[in-house]
């Protein structure tokens, strides 16, 4: 079994600290402070209320640790684990106040990120045994890109570029402004040097040759029919990686994958996948 | 027509700046910088690709302004405005580089927040002419609570507490730890003083009297049947505000509202409402 | 004995770290570094040089811990404890350098916040056996509101709103702009929803009825005579909480409390209460 | 007339932004947003409610500017200006919402810092025509040292060291640890190089010679009698600067100054000076 | 003439603000504030005191703007411009205080970054008319990577990866831990997906085939002789990009370039290139 | 043996955290995560590849600790230690991933700061047995002043002012604006009070008397001939500290020191000293 490499704790801690500050404000958890004795101890579990795939474990742990480092947590289901309804994800043991005060922040991360992982896993499952991979996009929730990209990985998805900075994606506006495919590709490749991949987006088959001639490493087929995608796969013949984009749903994805494209990218996974229902129960 | 009061720009700017840094990294928009001339000017519109309600206008404006303050923007549809498919939301005019580099960050905010506003408006519409109001919860996306609470308002929803700090919400664990309803309510009310509301969550009708006797300002009816909610409304007779929670969907919400409860709260609006599809078109 | 629930360490650490940076600059404690050997160990106590009530213990501890986590500290007097002249508050044991370098920052917090707690306790003592409570205001020292609100609690005071965000306070300018008491109250109550209290400030008895009719949860009697306050208490008859404000001093406060008002608020506690004299002695 | 050089806006903006965030939280000024129309305009003045000396003008301006840059402000009384009861300090003209929302933050800075300036001016006035100067200490309010040091200057006081980093202050613990006055002074002077002043604290006259021999630039006479201070002045004869410290009040300060010491330092000015009463009036 | 696309101002402002705070501390420019009248105006130029290539213009402008936005600056030599001794780079006109206070921070950026650009240009010039390009490495000054990578570009160099995050670089330790070239390459390529380039470092010719077989996009020849590099170029025949690294100096670089490698990378450019001497003169 | 007092960890941690974020971005060390198993353990050493003097040990330790606090490090050569080629500086033992991911950041600090310490030591050695000391200037790398000033100390150099805020340095522009030496010195001394040193820069011997008369604590002789410096030393006769500046190289420095000046300051040490070559080897 492969475990999923973790995110840097430096990144996680910043994101979780910000979320805790948002929930605590200046006055803190006024309910818990006033009703729960300082020395009360509790055992609790975070459990799945529906089946899915877990992501966000580092953030969940950080939420409890930053509120009270004496809370002991056993991770029953790590990032990427599949859960059934009722499965325990975290077992917690420690001061009741800390457990209650951090609960919502931990669940907000776990639910949101497991929702993305679960949706990704559904897509991945739908295209099993095709050669295609699922990748996310830059259509992420502002402030959460690092953890959402990781959640896609937890669901079995692959990585796309993280931002404007780590790969080139040439769209129609860039092509027009640069004076055509080849000029745009040449300008980009010259600018970014030898360590950066260059992708170009096309929406008609007759643009394929210009993209290949310009030396695109990756060609995105935007909103093309399955028929056209098949033709593109055939014509390219492995000279570039082909990525399908647009109108990707659980219903359509298998047909897209069967065209032979290498990658299918979806913004839906990060901007619209519903929360995975997780809850905390005291024991 | 009422306009929706804006968020503080101090809050908005922090959130948007963080999102831009996430997308720009150190190298910036390497595609645009290499393919678009520095002096290229463009006109573009951000338009709705589906019907809905707009939210996130301040964040969208800030994204463009922080990237390039010379971009001129006319807001055609402000926060809370209803849009049809094809309606223009922003009209942009200025340096092509800045418009292209800020596009995704602006759309990520607008799409996410308009998605929340749109879902809220659907709930609000479903309960029209009942006395009930829709409120969000603390089940928000980490780091975005301020703007998501505002998006609910844009959709016609009402406010609930913003965090652990501004109102008391007593749940079963608090009640058990404090030694009963009255003790928990007394402890909380004494602690928080005269300026903070106190809510208590119950899941059985026989808890109503204790909650009222303890002086709860608001009583949450958690996952109760419509039948029980009606009984609760009758028995309380206006002595406390009644909030329904649990299993709130577009299908169930009308029946819940017709029980006579004052407020219906939903976590789904902030953790699972899908993105509203908006896109940018160059002209 | 009731202990006072602590502030979130996330809030404390930010405030104390900022204070330490202010004192250390880039070069650090050049006196201690140059004159005290790295391996010197010391025992020291922080003691009260005058009688009072302690607050700021978390900040004091954080100052030493952030400078050198190996310093051992025994808290002899916690938040809310009364001290006589000479009483030990902290017993310290550890590296001399760390103890000396953190001393001033720790004392600045302890002295300032204990000053507020001490002044509050004097007010609270002066109104013993009346029904009134003491509350602070938003007239706090910029950047220290969380810890100053907590210090008032340490002195036996109650809480008022923390900021512009957690409760409504309608003053004359708001009333004029909104078109009268009832309109202002209605607008505010509709805007903030069911979880937020609404207070209105009046300075004449003839405004009481409008305030009550508008549904104010709390009515502030601003700079009224004791005579008028008594009349207000009688007329309101428990339908709203009454808060007295203005000209509150140790001399006047008993008479104000005896009018029957519920709360007496004072800005003086946070903007002008003198420091409690505490000092560190090496042993 | 000399004007007081301003603080760096980079420092001011950070401090004021933090204070505004503390007051606005996520929800902002819910009272003003709900009761004041977006297009309402107001004129207002900030006026002194008691006589004193003004400080904090930059912070006051920044508070309004950061909330709404369209508010126009005329500064009638700048930093260091004396005011009588009723004197106007700021004249404001602009959106009512912004003026009301920033009011408390601006007044908190102006009142606190003018309080320090006013107290300093009283000390300065009390020692007029002696050769002594008034200086603050490091006993400042955490997070506000830059602006409080400036406020002392606005009151006619002089500067002392800003922190642990910019000058050496050798106290008894340092002397003991280093093995005597001369060793401590030699170690410090060698460490800090040629650009940093070195002060040593003594509490007995018989320590004067060691301090002078060690080459102290400044000698602090800690809690000495006026008689002993006079002797110290005579014995030192200008070979070092003499600073008096301890038990400095408006009653005692003239006698201290008349001993001939060069500087009198006071922690009271920053940790206990009461607020100067300023208020805002709409017109 | 091609102009060099600018860095994002969001990145620049953070870096420059931090540098200014470092120089201003809390007290600010005490020399200038005390000796220069507030209304003094000056004209000044920043000029090259030796020949070189300019970089850091955005940072230099930001330093003056953040200190005083009323200073007018004309950029005579932009990023990437060659200068002779005596050439003017900036012409400044505005308040003397601001110009003097920002001078050192502006010069520290301009001198450091122009030093890197100048050194890069010397390397680029030395290999003119070979097919090789110069690239920097991750051996940058902590905190300045974004601006140093840009400075290399200003000197005519090309880009390498910006950090650990945007491209894969497999070294001997990775290969050993992964169990050989092919396994390491396969693991990396699978992990990073289709948008990231993968480089592998070899130091013997017999490793070339494994690197190619593993599908490395780029192969680094580490500290190889010119003879071996030529052999590598021939054997690879364009199937991967070849990068030379190690022992790159102005003396050796031409010979390296003439082996036919595609890229020559140098850490020296960013960790050891001397400052370009620039100074400010008042007029 | 004297050890060099450390920097405050509060300062170090900020600087190192920023550097790590710069290197890790959102995606982290994608090479190591994909090729090295999570449980792999390694031993490694950081060793000197050339002779020199070590600085930056705190930053190096912090880089590893912040990436993985379980990495054990033995410091073989601390700040200020001389190393020969091949000497071990750190011995590391712990998770391979953490060691590899933090390596570059640790080495960037150690190499840069040891380069400054090494250059300083060469200067110090060159003037052995003269009375002069070496001091750095404000010509530091932006963002690294605290650690670069410390590195100079590690090389045996002395301290100069840290910024604009902790000492006065009057240059020709200040003198002209203030109306002459005496006026500038008087204004500065009056402004800064009794705890701050005042230096004035002169470039002609005939300015010496005005500088002395104005009471300068330190006089900088800017770009003077050795002959003139000797005259200055004689004429000043200990009434002020004399600092030589300008054209300071390893070749010229001995002659400068032998003129009898007290301090020789050099910007080259911080803006142009080459990196000390250090590397990490796995075992």
Image (tube, coloured by chain):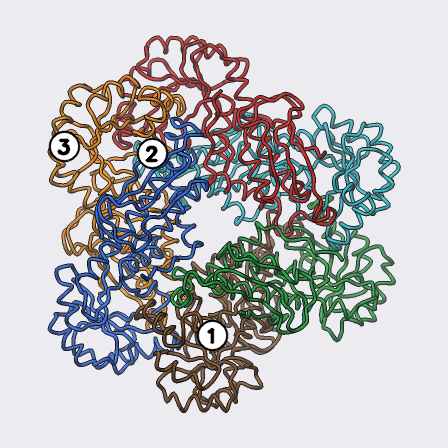
Chain colours: A orange, B blue, C brown, D green, E red, F cyan
Spatial CA distance of label 3 from label 2 is 29 Å
- The numbered mark 3 sits on a residue in which chain? A
Tag 1 subunit: C
Same chain shared by disc 1 and disc 2: no
Is label 3 or label 2 in front? Answer: 3
Q: Front-most of D71 and D264? A: D71
Query: Horizontal and vertical percent for residue D249?
Result: 72, 73
Residue on which the image places disc 1: C172
**Disc 2 sits on a residue from what chain?**
F
Which SS class for mark 1? helix
Q: Quadrant of the C terminus of chain D?
A: bottom right
Q: Where is residue A270 drawn, in percent x and y?
A: 25, 44
To which residue does mark 2 refer? F30
Give the class, few, some or many, for how many residues have Cα within 10 Å of label 2's Cα (few <14, many ≥20). many
In the image, residue C135 sits, relative to residue D154, either above or below, namely below
> Which numbered circle lies on residue A256?
3
Of residue D216 and residue A235, the one placed in the foreground of this image is A235
Q: Is residue A198 left or right of residue D104?
A: left
How many marks the image carries: the answer is 3
């Amino acid at each position: 079994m492969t475990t999923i490499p973790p995110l840097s704790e430096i990144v996680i801690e910043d994101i979780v600290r910000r979320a805790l500050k948002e929930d605590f404000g200046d006055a803190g958890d006024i309910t818990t402070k006033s009703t729960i004795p300082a020395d009360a101890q509790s055992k609790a579990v975070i459990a799945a209320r529906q089946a899915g795939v877990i992501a966000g474990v580092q953030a969940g742990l950080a939420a409890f640790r930053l509120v009270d480092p004496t809370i002991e947590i056993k991770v029953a289901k790590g990032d990427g684990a599949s859960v059934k309804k009722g499965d325990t994800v975290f077992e917690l043991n420690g001061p009741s106040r800390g457990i209650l005060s951090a609960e919502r922040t931990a669940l907000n991360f776990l639910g949101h990120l497991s929702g993305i992982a679960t949706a990704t896993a559904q897509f991945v499952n739908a295209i099993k045994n095709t050669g295609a991979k699922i990748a996310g996009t830059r259509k992420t929730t502002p402030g959460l890109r690092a953890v959402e990209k990781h959640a896609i990985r937890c669901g079995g998805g692959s990585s796309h570029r993280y931002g404007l900075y780590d790969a080139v994606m040439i769209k129609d506006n860039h092509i027009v402004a640069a004076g055509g495919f080849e000029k745009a590709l040449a300008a980009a490749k010259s600018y970014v040097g030898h360590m950066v991949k260059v992708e170009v987006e096309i929406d008609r088959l007759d643009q394929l040759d210009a993209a290949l001639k310009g030396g695109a490493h990756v060609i995105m087929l935007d909103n093309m029919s399955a028929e056209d995608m098949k033709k593109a796969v055939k014509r390219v013949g492995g000279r570039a990686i082909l990525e399908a984009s647009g109108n990707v749903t659980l219903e359509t994805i298998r047909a897209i994958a069967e065209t032979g494209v290498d990658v299918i990218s979806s913004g839906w996974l990060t901007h619209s996948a519903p929360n995975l229902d997780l809850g905390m129960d005291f024991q």
